């Protein structure tokens, strides 16, 4: 938690947080179910460019009288909402979130933060400018077993090796099967972000190779191996495939945390186990608070943050490095060399400066001493 709220606090009286959901597709409906299950949140309206889809979702989740519209900000104002939940496609994340922040609404957005790191930097600056919270729902962080694995790793002393195996065989059809880098661009951000959480450190560089097995039903590279160096010297190895039937791992992956005194194993679905060196004695069970499960957990933390000013895990400034890991891995595999995260951040910063059309947001971007210093700020 920051010493003082770094963003505006709304609905601190304990009443329900009224929200507008933008996006009435399958993921939007998942959010609507999460809202219905949370007594601290009240659905104020549904926005979608496809008005018929918004009206259909309103009938299913809010009743025929629930306000709908095509413009999220107009609908939020008309319905008396306090915040906006952005569940649009990644290409729409930047314009929808920018408009909401500038209109004075807190925003909870689906991952990724934006289509590019450059757009993410623009959104971080916009959040600073407006004093509104923009939190990214990196939903797989919200897992009690993941929190337990992190707690158990405290018994390992210095942690230097973190690895995850991710092997699935989904047949999505549609856009994923024609993407150039489907695994890295559409899935790996989850494991990359979880690694940042487990190591509680920042990534410095990556060497990555992606490829497509001969039997793959994906048009682009559906498998990859990436080795990240983190601040402090730890290494994180991601080894994954989206075309590996049989003995599939959890969607969270299968994890190994290795330190000087022992190892923690987590299969991604069940309680983690810890094995310590013989001289260290028996393992200690470390109780952890339940962070909630996936989007329900991120929704719960968002509500708590806008009520109290507590710094959430997914605040935009803290989340951008997870997307930067994806861009760095893709650049490494195409360039055939190790790529520093600062290379991605600095190039993205220059791109953000060149593309920014809002003079006030541009002024905030230019005020950052460096990208990492700007992202490290906990308050405007």
Image (tube, helix red, strand yellow):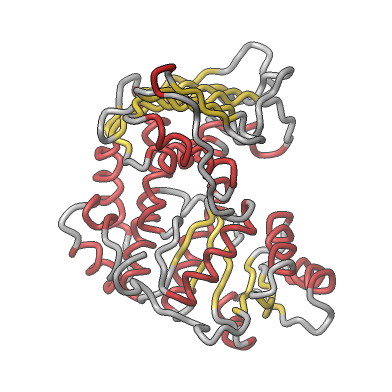
What residue appears at the point 32 percent right and 63 percent down from the top-left corner? Answer: 356
When the figure is inspected, residue 305 is found, relative to residue 165, above or below; the finding is below
What residue appears at the point 40 percent right and 79 percent down from the top-left corner? Answer: 8
Rendering coords of residue 65 (x, y %): 80, 84
Left or right? Give the position of 175 relative to 298: right
When the figure is inspected, residue 352 is found, relative to residue 237, above or below; the finding is below
Rendering coords of residue 284 (x, y %): 50, 35
Count the numbered circles shown. Answer: 0
Q: Residue furthest left?
A: 369
Left or right? Give the position of 104 relative to 20: left
- In the figure, residue 47 lies in which quadrant? bottom right
What residue appears at the point 29 percent right and 55 percent down from the top-left corner? Answer: 375
* Residue 358 visible from this viewpoint: yes
Who is closer to the viewer here, 37 or 284? 284
Placement of the C terminus among the 4 image quadrants: bottom left
When the figure is inspected, residue 36 is found, relative to residue 332, above or below; the finding is below
What residue appears at the point 60 percent right and 23 percent down from the top-left corner? Answer: 241
When the figure is inspected, residue 216 is found, relative to residue 56, above or below; the finding is above
Rendering coords of residue 186 (x, y %): 56, 39
* Residue 226 visible from this viewpoint: no
Rendering coords of residue 30 (x, y %): 72, 57
- In the figure, residue 34 lies in which quadrant? bottom right
Who is closer to the viewer here, 46 or 262? 262
- In the figure, residue 161 lies in which quadrant? top left
């Amino acid at each position: 938690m920051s010493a003082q709220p770094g963003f505006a606090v709304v609905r601190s009286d304990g009443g329900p947080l009224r929200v507008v959901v933008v996006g009435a597709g399958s993921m939007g409906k998942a959010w609507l179910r999460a809202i219905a299950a949370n007594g601290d949140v009240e659905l104020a309206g549904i926005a979608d460019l496809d008005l018929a889809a918004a009206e259909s979702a309103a009938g299913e989740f809010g009743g025929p009288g629930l306000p709908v519209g095509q413009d999220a900000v107009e609908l939020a104002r008309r319905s008396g909402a306090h915040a906006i939940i952005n569940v649009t496609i990644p290409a729409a994340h930047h314009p929808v979130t920018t408009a909401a922040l500038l209109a004075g609404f807190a925003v909870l957005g689906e991952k990724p933060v934006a289509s590019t790191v450059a757009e993410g930097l623009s959104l971080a600056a916009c959040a600073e400018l407006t004093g509104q919270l923009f939190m990214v729902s990196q939903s797989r962080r919200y897992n009690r077993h993941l929190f337990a694995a992190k707690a158990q790793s405290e018994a390992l002393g210095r942690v230097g090796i973190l690895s995850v195996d991710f092997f699935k065989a989904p047949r999505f059809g549609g856009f994923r099967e024609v993407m150039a880098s489907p695994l890295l661009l559409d899935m790996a951000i989850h494991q990359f972000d979880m690694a940042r959480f487990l190591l509680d450190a920042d990534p410095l560089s990556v060497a990555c190779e992606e490829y497509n097995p001969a039997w793959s039903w994906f048009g682009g590279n559906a498998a990859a191996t990436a080795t990240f160096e983190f601040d402090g010297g730890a290494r994180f190895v991601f080894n994954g495939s989206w075309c590996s039937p049989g003995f599939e791992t959890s969607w969270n992956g299968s994890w190994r945390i290795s330190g000087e005194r022992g190892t923690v194993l987590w299969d991604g679905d069940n309680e983690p186990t810890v094995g310590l060196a013989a001289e260290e004695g028996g393992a200690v069970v470390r109780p952890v608070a339940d962070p909630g499960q996936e989007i329900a957990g991120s929704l719960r933390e968002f509500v708590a943050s806008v009520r109290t000013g507590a710094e959430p895990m997914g605040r935009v400034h803290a989340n951008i490095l997870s997307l930067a890991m994806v861009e760095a891995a893709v650049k490494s595999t195409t360039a055939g060399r190790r790529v520093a995260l600062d290379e991605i951040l600095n190039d993205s910063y220059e791109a953000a400066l060149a593309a920014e059309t809002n003079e006030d947001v541009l002024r905030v971007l230019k005020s950052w001493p460096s990208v990492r210093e700007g992202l490290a700020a906990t308050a405007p």
